[in-house]
Structure formats: C-alpha cells, structure tokens
Amino acid sequence: MMRLAPITIFVYNRPKHIKQTLKTLKKNKLAKESELFIFSDGPKDQNDRKKVAEVRKYIKTIDGFKKITITERQKNLGLANSIIVGVTEIVNKYGKIIVLEDDLLASPYFLKFMNDSLRFYENEKKISCIHGYIYPIKNKLPETFFLKDPGCLGWATWKRGWKLFEHDGKKLLIELKRRNLTSEFDYNNFYPFTDMLENQINGLVDSWAIRWYASLFLKNKLTLYPGKSLIFHNGNDGSGEHGGIPNEDEVILSNKPITIKDIRIEESPGVMKEYIEYFRSIRPSFVLKARRKVKSSLYKLLNHYK
C-alpha cells in the first residue's frame, strides 16, 4: 500500500477558521490514515496572544487522523517564514507533503487527488507541484491540466520540487526581467504578480507564495490542477495576512473524485486563455480593491501620527 503524504497545516490566531478547515478535512476518507502536522506561529504582540492561545487549546483536542504532531513556536516567525521552515522540515523527512493554511475548506476528495497525483507523477521531473484550487471560471475545464503557476491554496509537492524554492526574491526578479518574462509571469499583464514580487522584496508583503511561483516558473516546471476546485478559500474576510481576489466566493467544490490519467505534459493553452480572460474580467474590481486598501492604510497611518 502506498505511503500517504503527511498533511501539514499552518495556524495562527483564527480559531473559527481552523475549526472549519479541520471539519472539512476530516470528511476525507484518507484522513484517518494520514499523519497530521500542525505548526502554530507565536504571537506578534499582546493583542494576538489570547487568540493564539485559543487556537492552541483547540488543536490539542483534534482527532480523526492516524497521528497528530503539534509544533508551537515561542516566537513569531511571520507567515512566510513559518511556512518555509515548516514545509522544509516535513518534506525533507518524508519526501513529500500536502500543505494547507487555516482558512481553506477541502472537498471530501481533496486528499485522494493529492495522494493519487503525488504517486502518479512521482518520477516525472517536469512536474513539481500539485494544486487543489481553481478560480471560478465559467467554462468547463479538462479533468486535469498543467500550468506553470504552482498556486498556494491547498497544494502538494515532493522534496525534489521544494529544493527549487529560491528564498531571494530580488534574484528571482532580476532573472524574470533579464529573460523578458514578466508579461508571461503576469498572465499577459492581467494579474500583477511582478508587482507582488517587488512588494515582497521591499518588505511590503510577507509572501512565500510569490517566490514559490517565480522559482518554478523560471525553471519551466509544471503544476497539476483538477478541472474542478477541491479547495474553497474562506479567508477573504479581512481576518488573515492577505485578502483574496474578487468573486472567489463563487467557487463550488467538486462533489466527486478527480480521475488521474496520462495527459500531455505541457502547459494547457486552452486553460491559459480561460485564466487570462478571468483575470481580465476581474481586473477593474481588483484594482478598486487595491486602491481602497491603500487608502485605508494611509488613513490609519495619518490617525496614528495625529
């Protein structure tokens, strides 16, 4: 019998969210056969201490998995470092990993898709990641397909894939510009991923995901996706480190298993067109949301100095 990939969940100060995440994850048949690792980051300040303690109290009551290991950080590593350190530790020990954060709701077939895919493509070096989330695209997509974008909402990888992760965002940005790849990296300039990378470099966002994307993109590696989403992101409520994108609550979770089978190992041009069209459609609302966020930050800063 295949050894299942360990599940790793990163939590911080949202007890309501992690309860919902675990509730859906436990509905997966493979949950009882899987090892679960939970990394709880330390509080940033006194304001977060109570919520962090509440989360830690709850995760000690979790059951429904083969084995549960909890790591409680004494100091706050921050979102990016918490994930980077935790993923590195687990994937180096077990050779593969399934990763979730505390604001993701899983389809009952999420773990099956992840484990089946990890086994099916284990020796295919062109493929470095498996992703479970799909944007709310209206048209029907293939059962499975490949993109260069590894995503960050419910994903899995192997040790060989995670080895490609480059910590230095500046080095990644220089290479993207040197090879004139920023337009392609940004889905034909319809989603500001390059801006996100620059913001990470300048300390404006604490993102591991943008560096993960750039790392695999520059190596021309592929990520396997399901044709229907196996993850719903319920963290787009202002409670997390980062918000989501407009219309993301329109995602409907798959109510049946995804079949893994041989397909052409190349980025799907048809799905790329669908993604670009989707980003084109949300661009006005995305820009408006970004402007509102900037105005809100400036308002808070002004009040602080007053």
Image: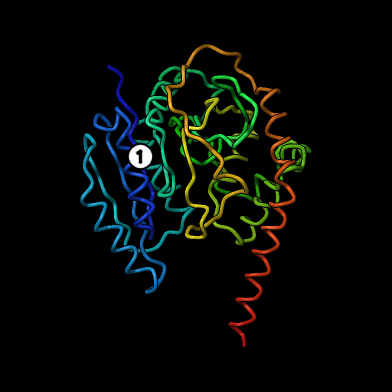
Task: Say whether residue 245 is left or right of residue 15.
Answer: right
Across and down, in percent, residue 203 comes to 60, 61
Q: How is the image coloured?
A: rainbow
As displayed, is residue 262 above or below residue 300? Answer: above
Q: Quadrant of residue 135?
A: top right
Residue 69 picture quarter: top left
* Residue occupying the point 38% across, 68% down: 48
The residue at 40%/72% (across/down) is 45
Q: Is residue 86 left or right of residue 144?
A: left
- Is the residue 235 above or below the residue 29 in the image? below
Q: Position of residue 281 (x, y in %)?
A: 73, 41
The answer to which quarter of the image holds residue 214 is top right
Query: At 74% from the left edge and 50% from the top edge, which residue is drawn?
Result: 284
Which x, y percent locates residue 278?
69, 37
Q: Quadrant of the N terminus?
A: top left
Q: Nearer the viewer, residue 56 or 299?
A: 299
Rendered-image quadrant of the C terminus: bottom right
In percent of the image, x 49 and y 13: which residue is there? 261
Which residue extends farthest bottom? 306
* x, y percent for residue 140: 62, 24
- Give the camera-side residue of 94 and 228: 228
How many callouts does the rendering have? 1
Q: Amino acid at mark 1?
A: Thr
Neighbour tally class for label 1: few under 14, some 14-19, many 20 plus, Cα within 10 Å:
some
Secondary structure under the numbered disc 1 in the rendered image? helix
List the single residue furthest toward the top.
262
- Of 231 and 95, which appears nearest the observer? 231
The residue to which callout 1 is attached is: 24
